[in-house]
Image: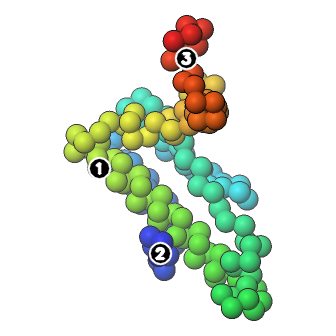
């Protein structure tokens, strides 16, 4: 199965700029961007909610980039090209998902909270997804539902 935009030539910075333009068009009040060796991060505010996406970056030393499909060692420039292609693909995918979510909200299909729920930043700095993943995992492992509200037992 092929990946969305796996052969894109759109540079990552253009995809990031497209995300920023899209956010403005749909009413975002703020936008921030940063990166480290593991991920790029974008954060924005829309309908008084802060939303955080961490876009994991591939490992440039992974065999997907250092070796050809037949297992031969790639030249450093060929490995860099393969890595950059994977980075461009990820940015295009993120641009697509953000645009699709915002268009669904604008069309009245869903809400900002429902579309971005896992990425909404809580007052303690964690996202809703980071906060709830352990409880979801525990519920599936035990077969028991956690309390809806802490301390209520129900």
Q: What is the distance, in whole Å, between disc 1 and disc 2 at their CAs?
A: 26 Å
- Which comes before the other along the chain, label 3 or label 2? 2
Per the model, the C-alpha gap separating discs 3 and 2 is: 40 Å
Residue located 48% across and 58% down the image: 94
Q: Secondary structure at mark 2?
A: loop
In-image side of 96 versus 141 (left or right) = left
| 83 in relation to 73, above or below | above
Q: Which residue is mark 2?
A: 1
Q: Are marks 1 and 2 in contact (CB under 8 Å)?
A: no
Q: Is residue 91 left or right of residue 69?
A: left
Instruction: Say whether residue 150 is left or right of residue 15.
Output: right
Which of the numbered marks, if any, corresponds to residue 124?
A: none
Q: CA distance from mark 3 to mark 1?
A: 34 Å
Which dot marks residue 103?
A: 1
Q: Is residue 75 visible?
A: no
Within 10 angstroms of label 1, few (less than 14), some, or many (20 or more) residues?
some
Nearer to us of marks 1 and 2 is 2
Q: Quadrant of residue 77?
A: bottom right
Q: Residue furthest front?
A: 143
Along the horizontal axis of the image, is 142 left or right of 63? left
The residue wearing badge 3 is 147
Along the viewing direction, whichever of 83 and 131 lies nearer the viewer: 131
| Labels 3, 1: front one | 3
Residue at image location 28% in from the left, 47% down from the top:
104
């Amino acid at each position: 199965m092929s990946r969305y935009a796996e052969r894109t030539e759109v540079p990552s910075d253009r995809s990031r700029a497209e995300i920023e333009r899209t956010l403005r068009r749909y009413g975002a009040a703020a936008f921030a961007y940063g990166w480290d060796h593991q991920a790029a991060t974008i954060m924005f505010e829309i309908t008084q909610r802060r939303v955080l996406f961490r876009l994991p970056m591939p490992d440039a030393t992974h065999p997907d980039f250092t070796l050809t499909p037949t297992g031969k060692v790639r030249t450093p420039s060929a490995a860099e090209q393969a890595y950059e292609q994977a980075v461009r693909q990820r940015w295009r995918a993120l641009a697509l998902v953000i645009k699709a979510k915002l268009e669904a909200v604008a069309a009245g299909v869903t809400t900002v909270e429902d579309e971005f729920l896992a990425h909404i930043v809580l007052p303690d700095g964690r996202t809703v997804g980071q906060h709830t993943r352990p409880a979801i995992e525990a519920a599936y492992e035990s077969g028991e539902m956690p309390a809806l509200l802490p301390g209520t037992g129900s």
